[in-house]
Image (spheres, coloured by chain):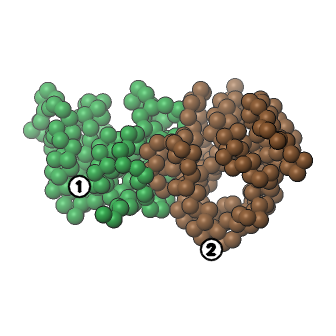
Chain colours: A brown, B green
């Protein structure tokens, strides 16, 4: 079965973007190294440290089978030009379908219900990972007990304010296992298993 | 000169205590291992993993020369019975001196001004570390550019709410260096240098 994995870059004080949705202070590690990692978008090539390359490669070479995203990041990126750098189908949770979408040249689809989107993404992913790349969906799936792993690429900066990765959780505390740690350059990658409560 | 180091256990979502000041979910790693580390208080012996022991020992064997604390933690712990587990003089920042204090059997002293307390603690510490163990003082010293290091003992749990380590910073972003990482059991110790802006 697909594993559902929330994966974001986060400041040490818990933010995945500044108050203006800026991620400049958090995404530096995608470009601060010597190891080139091509993406599905010919215009994007990551240049990362050897450690970050080791961390990223599995996801970029077939490990991820589907991506769940929210409407805000879809709009901010212009729908990734129709093709996300991960090169996998994107399932966008949104109250409405944006004008001009869906497009025949894109495998991005739209869902009003976060859980219907997750089901569709899991079906698409098969045995691969379903990546969740928004805090809102992370919260919803955590509260529903549907998240298997949390990957935090922890960036050595304090932003002071912004959009929290883990805001508004309804069911806490959430227990996690000890992380797998990969020490990159300008980032520490921490992969935590979510511990499900016995019911 | 003394190094000024903020050092606390923090949940992955950034809290150093729950809303009721509880730290039960964050302090488990002090007692989940086989390596016994005596403290200055005969009633407290830490029992930690080998990795956490390696992380803790320098502080507990002369590395720390003075501790800065706030009034809330002083009251919650009953003033550590007059002697903090670290076994060093404690400098408490408080609007008022609590009844019965200072005591002749204790080297705990009281300051109304956070910066006067820091000066006194640095004088006491000499070449050793001044440990800062409250979020309020951490914020004040960070804003004033007086903090040298941040040690986060990152605990694999999401609390959802509570007292943030890094709330209310006035001067952001604060740049940090890559951390020294020690992977414990039920905790990941991350030691970050604070990068001072060139003025």
Q: Does residue A13 appear left or right of residue B72 in this picture?
A: right
Q: Which chain carries label 2?
A: A
Q: In front here: A51 or B170? A: B170
Residue at mark 2: A34
Which residue is situated farthest in the bottom direction here? A34
- Marks 1 and 2, how far apart in space? 42 Å
Q: Which dot marks residue B65?
A: 1
Q: Which residue lies furthest to the front in this view?
A: A99
Question: In the visual, does A116 lie left or right of B186?
Answer: right
Furthest residue to the left?
B104
Q: Are marks 1 and 2 in contact (CB under 8 Å)?
A: no
Q: Which residue is drawn at 82% across and 45% down?
A: A108
Badge 1 and badge 2 both on one subunit: no
- Classify B124 as above or below A140: below
Is the C terminus of chain B in the top left, top right, bottom left or bottom right quadrant?
Answer: bottom left
Q: Using the image as rendered, state which of residue B53 and residue B78 is in the foreground.
A: B78
Q: Measuring 32% from the left and 58% from the top, which residue is drawn there?
A: B148
Whole-percent x and y of residue B64? 27, 55
Look at 46% across and 48% down and name the residue there: A159
Question: What residue is at 82 percent from the left and 41 percent from the top?
Answer: A100
Q: Where is residue A54 in the image (x, y as percent from the top left)?
A: 68, 65
**How many numbered circles does the render carry?**
2
Quarter of the image containing the N terminus of chain B? Answer: bottom left
Q: In which quarter of the image is residue A38?
A: bottom right
Residue A125 visible somewhere in the drawing? no
Q: In this view, does B41 lie above or below B196?
A: above
């Amino acid at each position: 079965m697909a594993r559902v994995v929330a994966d974001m870059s986060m400041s040490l004080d818990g933010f995945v973007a500044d108050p203006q949705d800026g991620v400049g202070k958090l995404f530096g590690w995608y470009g601060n190294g010597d190891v080139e990692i091509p993406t599905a978008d010919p215009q994007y090539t990551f240049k990362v440290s050897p450690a970050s390359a080791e961390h990223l490669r599995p996801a970029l070479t077939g490990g991820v089978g589907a991506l769940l995203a929210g409407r805000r990041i879809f709009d901010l990126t212009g729908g990734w030009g129709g093709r996300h750098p991960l090169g996998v189908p994107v399932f966008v949770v949104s109250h409405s379908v944006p004008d001009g979408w869906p497009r025949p040249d894109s495998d991005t689809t739209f869902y009003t219900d976060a859980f219907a989107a997750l089901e569709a993404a899991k079906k698409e992913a098969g045995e691969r990972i379903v990546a969740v790349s928004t805090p809102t969906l992370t919260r919803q799936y955590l509260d529903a007990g549907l998240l298997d792993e949390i990957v935090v690429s922890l960036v050595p900066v304090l932003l002071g304010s912004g959009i929290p990765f883990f805001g508004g959780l309804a069911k806490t505390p959430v227990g996690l296992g000890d992380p797998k740690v990969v020490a990159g350059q300008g980032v520490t990658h921490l992969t935590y298993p979510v511990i499900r409560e016995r019911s």
